[in-house]
Image: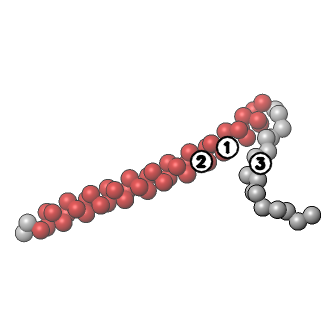
Amino acid sequence: MAATPFDAAHRKEQTQAQLEAALAAYREMLDTYVHNRVPRAAAEADGSPERRITEPQSNSVKPQ
């Protein structure tokens, strides 16, 4: 009988850890989305043209 309460407690801890991990991932995605939207929204509110986001330059040689 002692195994049942331990198993239930272990499942509860495991479920809580999975939920916390899922919420952390969701928070990170939401923060990234908001971070990418803020400059665009600020430019639109300002009336200035949208800022272009440049992609990182690679060190590879481009064909000419």
- Residue 38 appears left or right of 4: right
Given the current orientation, which residue lies at the most extreme top position? Answer: 46
* Number of numbered discs: 3
- On screen, residue 6 versus residue 46, left or right, reads left
Q: Nearer the viewer, mark 1 or mark 3?
A: 3
Q: Which residue is mark 3?
A: 54
SS for dot 3: loop
| Furthest residue in direction left, as rendered | 1
Residue at mark 1 to residue at mark 2: CA–CA distance: 9 Å
Q: Which residue is mark 2?
A: 32
Inspect the image, locate mark 2, and give the three-letter code of the amino acid beneath it.
Answer: Thr
**37 versus 19 height, above or below:** above
Residue sitting at 55 percent across and 51 percent down?
29
Residue 9: x, y in percent? 20, 59
- Residue 18 image point, x, y percent: 37, 59
Determine which quarter of the picture holds residue 15. Answer: bottom left
- Residue located 30% across and 61% down the image: 14
Q: Dot 2 surroundings within 10 Å: few (below 14), some, or many (20 or more)? A: few
- Residue at 15 percent across and 63 percent down: it is 6
Q: Earlier in the sequence, mark 1 or mark 3?
A: 1
Q: Position of residue 47 (x, y in %)?
A: 81, 32
Disc 2 to disc 3, C-alpha distance: 16 Å
Instruction: Determine which residue is flagged by label 1.
Output: 37
The amino acid pointed to by label 1 is Arg
Q: Nearer the viewer, mark 1 or mark 2?
A: 2
Farthest-out residue, right: 64
| The N terminus - image quarter | bottom left
Q: Secondary structure at mark 1?
A: helix
Front label number (2 vs 3): 3
Q: Secondary structure at mark 2?
A: helix
